Image: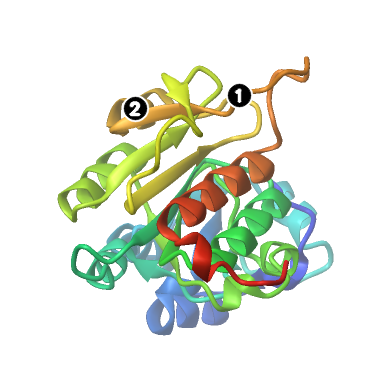
C-alpha cells in the first residue's frame, strides 16, 4: 500500500475521537493507522502504544500525504483503515481446528496484494469448505470493501484471521497438526502427483514474487502446477483455486460429489 491511498475512502476513518474509539472498542477491525509527522502531544503516545499492543501497522505521513488521502476532510492528523469484517487472532483460528482425523483446510495468503485476487481466493476457499483464510496485515491485501465485494460475500461467511510473521505462524499451524503446502512455480513436484494431506494449510504467494524466502523455508513441501503452454505462471487466484479443489477432490469420496457446479 502506498503512502497516500486515494481509493476505497469508504473504508477510511479519520479524526482523533473516531480513530481512538475504533482502537479502544474494535481493534480487530483496524487494519492500519496513519499519523501526521510532527505530532508531539499525548495523543501521539497513546496511538503509538495502542497500535503496538494490538499489533496494528502504523505509518507516519507528512501533512500533504493525509490531505491527498482525505481531500477536504478535517482529519486532525490521524486516519485509520477499517476492515469490512472482523478479523480473528491466529489462536482463535487454531482453537477451531477439529480433532484428527477429520479433514481440515486453512488458506494462507503470503503478501498477496491485489484485493480482487484475494477476494476470489476467499470465495474458492469458502466453496470447498475451508476452515479459515489467514491474511498478513503488512504488505498484503486487506479485507476492505473491495475484497468483500470480490469474494461475492464469501468473506462474510468464511472466518478470516490476521497474522504477523508468516514464517513463524506457519510453525504454529504445523504444531496444530496441519501439513503446510506452498504453491510455487519452482515446486518440488506436481500438485497432482499424489493425494494431498487431509489436514492441510495451503500457502499462496503474491502475483509476481511468489512465496517469500522465509515462507518457503517454513513449508513442509512446495508443489508446482504443471503447464504445457508458455504463459510461465498463473494468476494467484487461479493457482489457489486449483490447489483448493485438488484438496477437496482428495478428501471427498467420488460417490458423494455434489451434482451441480
User: Residue 226 shows which numbered tag?
Assistant: 1
Residue 87 picture location, percent across and down: 44, 70
Q: Secondary structure at mark 2?
A: helix
Position above or below: 69 against 184: below
Q: Residues within 10 Å of mark 2 (few under 14, many from 20)?
A: few
Residue 261 picture location, percent across and down: 73, 66
Q: Residue at x 74, y 62 (%)?
A: 150
Marks 1 and 2, how far apart at CA: 24 Å
Return the residue at label 2: 214
Left or right of residue 68: residue 61: left
Q: Residue at x 55, y 60 (%)?
A: 125
**Precedes in sequence: disc 1 or disc 2:** 2
Q: Secondary structure at mark 1?
A: loop
Position above or below: 14 against 125: below
Q: Residue at x 54, y 56 (%)?
A: 35
The answer to whether residue 74 of the structure is visible from this angle is no
Left or right of residue 45: residue 138: right
Quadrant of the rendered image containing residue 50: bottom left
Q: Report the mark closest to the observer, 1 or 2.
A: 1
User: Residue 17 shows which numbered tag?
Assistant: none
Q: Residue at x 49, y 33 (%)?
A: 191
Q: Residue furthest right?
A: 72
Amino acid at each position: 500500500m502506498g503512502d497516500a491511498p486515494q481509493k476505497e475512502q469508504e473504508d477510511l476513518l479519520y479524526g482523533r475521537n473516531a480513530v481512538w474509539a475504533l482502537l479502544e472498542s474494535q481493534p480487530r477491525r483496524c487494519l492500519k493507522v496513519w499519523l501526521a509527522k510532527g505530532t508531539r502531544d499525548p495523543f501521539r503516545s497513546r496511538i503509538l502504544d495502542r497500535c503496538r499492543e494490538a499489533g496494528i501497522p502504523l505509518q507516519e505521513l507528512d501533512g500533504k500525504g493525509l490531505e491527498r488521502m482525505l481531500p477536504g476532510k478535517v482529519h486532525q492528523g490521524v486516519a485509520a483503515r477499517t476492515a469490512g469484517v472482523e478479523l480473528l487472532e491466529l489462536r482463535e483460528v487454531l482453537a477451531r481446528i477439529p480433532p484428527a482425523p477429520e479433514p481440515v483446510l486453512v488458506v494462507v495468503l503470503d503478501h498477496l496484494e491485489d484485493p480482487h485476487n484475494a477476494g476470489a481466493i476467499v470465495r474458492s476457499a469458502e466453496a470447498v469448505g475451508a476452515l479459515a483464510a489467514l491474511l498478513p496485515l503488512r504488505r498484503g491485501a486487506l479485507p476492505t470493501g473491495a475484497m468483500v465485494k470480490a469474494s461475492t460475500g464469501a468473506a462474510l461467511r468464511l472466518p478470516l484471521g490476521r497474522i504477523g510473521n508468516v514464517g513463524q505462524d506457519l510453525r504454529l499451524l504445523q504444531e496444530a497438526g496441519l501439513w503446510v503446502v506452498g504453491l510455487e512455480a519452482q515446486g518440488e513436484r506436481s500438485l497432482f502427483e499424489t493425494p494431498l494431506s487431509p489436514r492441510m494449510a495451503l500457502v499462496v504467494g503474491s502475483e509476481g514474487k511468489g512465496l517469500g524466502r522465509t515462507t518457503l523455508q517454513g513449508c513442509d513441501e512446495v508443489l508446482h502446477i504443471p503447464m504445457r503452454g508458455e504463459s510461465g505462471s498463473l494468476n494467484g487466484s487461479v493457482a489457489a483455486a486449483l490447489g483448493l479443489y485438488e484438496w477437496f477432490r482428495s478428501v471427498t469420496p467420488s460417490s458423494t460429489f455434489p451434482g451441480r457446479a
